[in-house]
Amino acid sequence: MASIAINGLGRIGRAALKILQQAAGAEVVAVNDLVPPGNLTCLPRYDTVYGRWHTTVIADGDVLVIGGRKVPVLAMRDPAGLPWKTFDVDLVLEMHGRVPSRGRPEEAPVRRAGAVDMLPASTGAALATTKALPGLAGRFDGVAIRGRP
């Protein structure tokens, strides 16, 4: 089973969370968002675009209990400090929409905090990635996520 972390529970991150909760062979093992877990409980359940999600979501300290499964919630601004190795994460979905500060593209693995591979998923971040790494132009759009095996 693939262990997945989500960095950013905005609209796209919440949509990914809902899909992964129902996907066979995938498990969300941690999420990172600056919004307190208590506030995050209503956001996935009541969405003006995706409609109502009938899965129970409650906060228990720094954990979201989603359909009976506990998912730790981190609240770190700097992705380089995220303890993905602690959670044995196979894949991180970057859903926060912020592009790291300017730097050399080869520095990107340092910001991944030990996760295998990830690409930004928001449209703005996807566009910025293709500008920084022109070889990726036309290979993914604002919702594509690709990682090397």
Image (cartoon, rainbow, N blue to C red):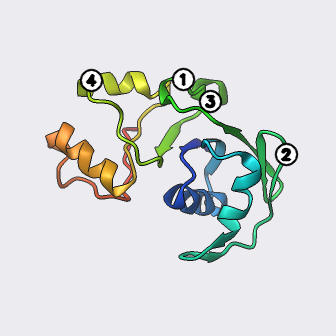
Q: Is the C-beta separation of discs 3 and 2 under 8 Å? A: no
Foreground label between 4 and 2: 2
CA gap between label 3 and label 1 equals 15 Å
Q: Secondary structure at mark 2?
A: loop
Asked whether, in this view, residue 1 is left or right of residue 12, the answer is right
First in residue order: circle 1 vs circle 4: 1
Quick one: label 2 or label 1, which is nearer the N terminus?
A: 2
Residue 81's mark?
A: 1
**Local crowd at mark 1 within 10 Å, few (<14), some, or many (≥20)?**
few
CB within 8 Å, label 4 to label 2 = no
Q: Quadrant of the C terminus?
A: top left
Lateral position of residue 96 relative to residue 148, left or right: right
Check disc 3 and report the residue beneath it: 88
The mark lying in front, picked from 3 and 2, is 2
Q: Secondary structure at mark 3?
A: loop
Counting every numbered tag in the picture gives 4
Marker disc for residue 60:
2
What type is the residue that disc 4 sits on?
A: Glu
Q: Are marks 3 and 1 in contact (CB under 8 Å)?
A: no
The span from disc 3 to disc 4 (Cα, nearest Å) is 23 Å
* SS at badge 1: helix
Q: Which residue sits furthest left?
A: 134
Circle 4 packing at 10 Å, graded few (<14), some (14-19), many (20+), is few
- Cα gap from disc 2 to disc 1, whole angstroms: 23 Å
Q: Going 49% across and 25% down the picture, which residue do you hit?
A: 113
- Residue for badge 4: 106
Residue 120 coordinates in the image, percent (x, y): 38, 46
144 left or right, relative to 132: right
